[in-house]
Amino acid sequence: MDASTLIPAQADLPALKAVAAGCTACELYAPATQTVFGAGNPEAKVLLVGEQPGDVEDQRGLPFVGPAGKLLQRAVAEAGFEQGAVYVTNAVKHFRFEQRGKRRIHQTPQPEHIRACNPWVAAEISAVHPEVVVCLGATAVKALLGSKYRVTKDRGELLQYTGPGAEERTKALITIHPSAILRMPDDAREKGYADLVADLTVAARAVA
Ligand code: URA
Ligand code: SF4
């Protein structure tokens, strides 16, 4: 089962978001607080795709508003995007976690979750029709580009995008996930952040 049967034809983003709020196409909806749909400029030239909402996003109902999101927003600005220029979303729209006492520990979504949720990100890409789809980390790469690509090998260059929602002119750009930068040891983090900004700058220049 995937979410495709739920998706209204020709729907705009608010309509998609409203239907996604009731999605039960995979098991992840049950323990999570809410569907976290994408947000940002509906006519963005650059659409960024993360993995799944984190703990803060799950509670607030918005993507990339927690610690990784703050880092990402700073990097996006530093790469040269105007405030509100981009659209941000996730490959999987519900937070997958393991409850340990009071803490909710992030768990990477599995292939079946990525597959079930794929119609949502595909519909977002079709609605926004960006010029560049940025994949933040391995889950987004798996969801949109497939197993041929690897973050470390393929990051930072404009690729032809042929994934869900692709148009002929659509490009893809792979970069590291902002959470991976937060997990780096202190002495590596500055370079990790600079490399993220450099990759995002490639996307910004492509649409300037
Ligand atoms: N990490 C993600 O991949 N997405 C979010 O929205 C927040 C953290
Ligand atoms: Fe639906 Fe995606 Fe949530 Fe699964 S993770 S229930 S497919 S919105």
Image: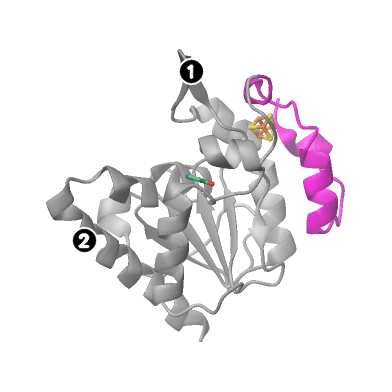
Q: Residues within 10 Å of mark 1 (few under 14, many from 20)?
A: few
Q: Amino acid at mark 1?
A: Lys
The one of 73 and 113 positioned closer to us in this rendering? 73
* Callout 2 crowding tier (Cα within 10 Å): few <14, some 14–19, many ≥20: few
Magenta span: 1-30
From the image, tell me which residue sits under label 1: 102
> Which numbered circle lies on residue 144?
none
Name the spot of residue 36 as percent of width and height, x first.
66, 42
- The mark nearer the N terminus, 1 or 2, is 1
Q: Is residue 2 magenta?
A: yes
Res 190 label? 2
Are the residues at dot 1 and dot 2 in contact (C-beta closer than 8 Å)? no
Ligand 2 falls in quadrant:
top right
| Coloration mode | one colour
Regarding residue 93, the answer to whether it shows in the image is: no
**Residue furthest bottom in the image:** 208
Whether 176 is drawn above or below 129: the answer is above
State the residue in front, 96 or 160: 96
Is residue 152 positioned above or below 87 on the image?
Answer: above
The reply to whether the magenta stretch includes residue 97 is no
Q: CA distance from mark 1 to mark 2?
A: 32 Å
The residue most toward the front is 102
- Number of numbered markers: 2
Residue type at the position of mark 2: Glu
